Image: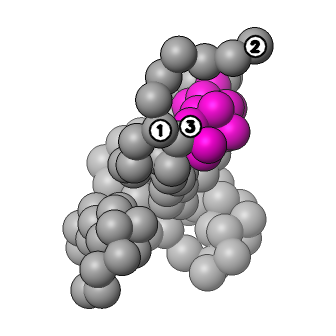
Amino acid sequence: MKSDLKPLAGKAAVVTGAAGAIGAAVVSKYAAIGLTKTAAIECGPMKIRVNSVNPGPIESRMMRAIETLASPGDPGAVHGQFAEQIPFGRYVACVGRAMVLLGVGWLWRAASGRTV
């Protein structure tokens, strides 16, 4: 099917988590990643770059609550099990949140041909 959209240029970034601990979170994150892939395929011919940024778990009260819900008697064991599944072997520090946003900024600048 031919699109009526004119070729443009642009960029978009979708930020989601790497994985969810609860069913609905997993479904919504995979939906966002699927949307990103579809948008990249559909918008590529119009020179619109679409990326997905997926940071791992962030060291936060929310993760502590998830670990406690998963194992009220030993949330530290759950923390260890989660950390073992992460390539770096640890959660993202709170400072890492800012790094995610800087990464998105880098993607946008790289797409525009400018350097950081």
Location of mark 3 (residue): 43
Task: Report the amino acid beneath label 3.
Answer: Cys
For marks 3 and 2, give the one nearer the viewer: 2
> Nearer the N terminus, badge 1 or badge 3?
1
Q: What is the magenta range?
A: 31-45
Which residue is found at the position 62% from the left and 43% from the top?
Answer: 45
Query: Is residue 76 visible from the viewing direction of this image?
Result: yes
Q: Is residue 87 left or right of residue 32?
A: right
Tell whether label 3 touches label 1 (CB within 8 Å). no
Q: Earlier in the sequence, mark 3 or mark 2?
A: 2
| Placement of the C terminus among the 4 image quadrants | bottom left
Residue 100 versus residue 31 in the image, above or below: below
Verify CB contact (< 8 Å) between mark 3 and mark 2. no
Residue closer to the observer: 73 or 6: 6
Location of the N terminus (image quadrant): top right
Helix, strand or loop under label 3? helix
Check if residue 41 falls in the magenta segment: yes
Name the residue carrying label 1: 7
User: What is the distance, in whole Å, between disc 1 and disc 3 at their CAs?
Assistant: 9 Å
Left of 90 or right of it: where is 8? left
Depth check, front residue: 43 or 53: 43
| Residue 98: image location, x then y, percent | 24, 67
Which residue has dot 2 on it? 1
